[in-house]
Amino acid sequence: MTKTIRVGTMLIADGTRTPKLVIVGTQPYSAGWSSIVESNSAQLDRELENAGWTFFYMANEIHTRGFGSNDQSRMDRAIAHVIDAVRHESCNCLEITQILRGRSFLGFPYTGVVAHARHIQKSHSFYNLSNLPARIGFRQRERLYGPTSPVKDQASSSSKAVDVWEDEGGSGAGPISSTP
């Protein structure tokens, strides 16, 4: 599968909904994910936009490394790490933007992969409530502090504090004695 993964390769989660007008050609890659063929990200973005759907591009880069005995096992492990990161971001697609081969860490060869999470959906808002799992419950915001008092009450309480301080000898006019 190493030959199918290159810069610009896009992987899509199996079962991702797409508009009926957009035909996405895929080729199985690994468990639950397929490689998009015969289309690049700009073409797919245009087709989805024309159908009224959105093809999100997440700005943060996903950097992973795959260690192994040969190039294919290193690439497969690096891509598996990318897929896990994309799942963690609740996205259904990814795009490979950089491949770093011939690297080693402490004498162990690895392949580095840089990718961006992508997401295909009908809504223009990524955090659309209809896309959230049903098990996530929403609750009212909790108050961290009690109700606030009006400004005039705060001013009168601070003037009371100054009066108490002056009554205790806190006028600042002379030294404070420790004897009663």
Image (cartoon, rainbow, N blue to C red):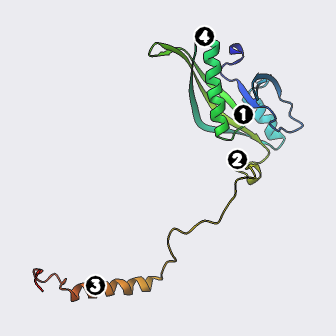
Could you tell me the amino acid type at mark 3? Answer: Val
Could you tell me which secondary element the residue under label 1 belongs to? strand
Could you tell me the amino acid type at mark 1? Answer: Cys
Asked if labels 1 and 2 touch by Cβ distance under 8 angstroms, the answer is: no
Residue that carries the numbered disc 3 in the rendered image: 162
Judging depth in this view, the residue of 48 and 25 nearest the camera is 25
- The quarter of the rendered structure image containing the N terminus is top right
Q: Residue 44: x and y, percent?
A: 78, 32
**Which mark lies nearer to you, 2 or 4?**
4
Mark 1 vs mark 3, CA separation in Å? 64 Å
Asked if labels 4 and 3 touch by Cβ distance under 8 angstroms, the answer is: no
- The quarter of the rendered structure image containing the C terminus is bottom left
How many neighbours does mark 1 have within 10 angstroms: few (below 14), some (14-19), or many (20 or more)? many
Residue that carries the numbered disc 4 in the rendered image: 70
Pointer 3 or 2: first along the chain? 2
Could you tell me which secondary element the residue under label 3 belongs to? helix
